[in-house]
Amino acid sequence: MATTPMITVQQYFEYLREKKVMGAKCPKCGNIDLPPRRLCSECLAESEWMEFSGKGIIQTFTAIYVGAKVMTKKGYDRKHPYVFAVVKMEEGPSVSGQLVGIDERDPNTYYIGMPVEATFLKTEIRTDKEGNPVFRWDIGFQPVST
Ligand SMILES: [Zn+2]
């Protein structure tokens, strides 16, 4: 039997790199956490990995015109904002992520209640000692393709 990796932040990002949205489910009370938590946020029992469908609904969003350095390096600025959304996943928990595949400058292209699906965004977070880029994979969201 294959051993299940422990619930860690590193493993969560590793799953995102594999294009999987993995949260945690508590075998004791049934609570679901995303991002995953090793100990259930409700009863502190040991949780288990649970794969999410990646589908959800936008609960709220904001357009960011003065962004973090990692985002300005991607080309976002006062003329090209990026959008962050809080998405209620169909499994229950809400998680935030960048909204892509829309026109950030046109708020008519995205709205509260809009169905979205997870996408996986690669961001250069720093360079290593040799000057090579180090990447992190984040959860993002895009309109559901019809
Ligand atoms: Zn629990």
Image (cartoon, rainbow, N blue to C red):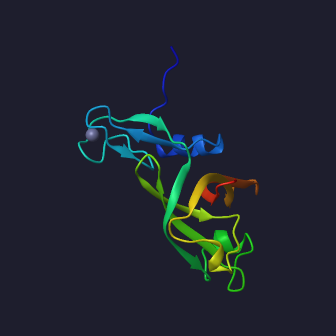
Residue 34 in percent (x, y) is at 44, 49
From the viewer's side, name the closer residue of 12 and 80.
80
From the viewer's side, name the closer residue of 135 and 50.
50
Quarter assignment of residue 142: bottom right
Q: Residue furthest top?
A: 1
Residue 63 in percent (x, y) is at 58, 78
User: What is the count of numbered marks?
Assistant: 0
Which residue is painted at 56% across and 64% down in the image? Answer: 114
Q: Is residue 107 left or right of residue 57?
A: right
Residue 6 in percent (x, y) is at 45, 33
Quadrant where ligand 1 appears: top left
Q: Is residue 73 left or right of residue 8?
A: right
Q: Is residue 135 left or right of residue 88?
A: right
From the viewer's side, name the closer residue of 76 and 144.
144
From the viewer's side, name the closer residue of 16 and 87.
87
Residue 130 in percent (x, y) is at 75, 53
Q: Residue furthest front?
A: 146
Q: Residue furthest bottom?
A: 78
Which residue is painted at 62% across and 65% down in the image? Answer: 99
Quarter assignment of residue 40: top left
Q: Residue 78: in sight, yes or no?
A: yes
Q: Residue 128: in sight, yes or no?
A: no
Q: Is residue 117 left or right of residue 87?
A: right
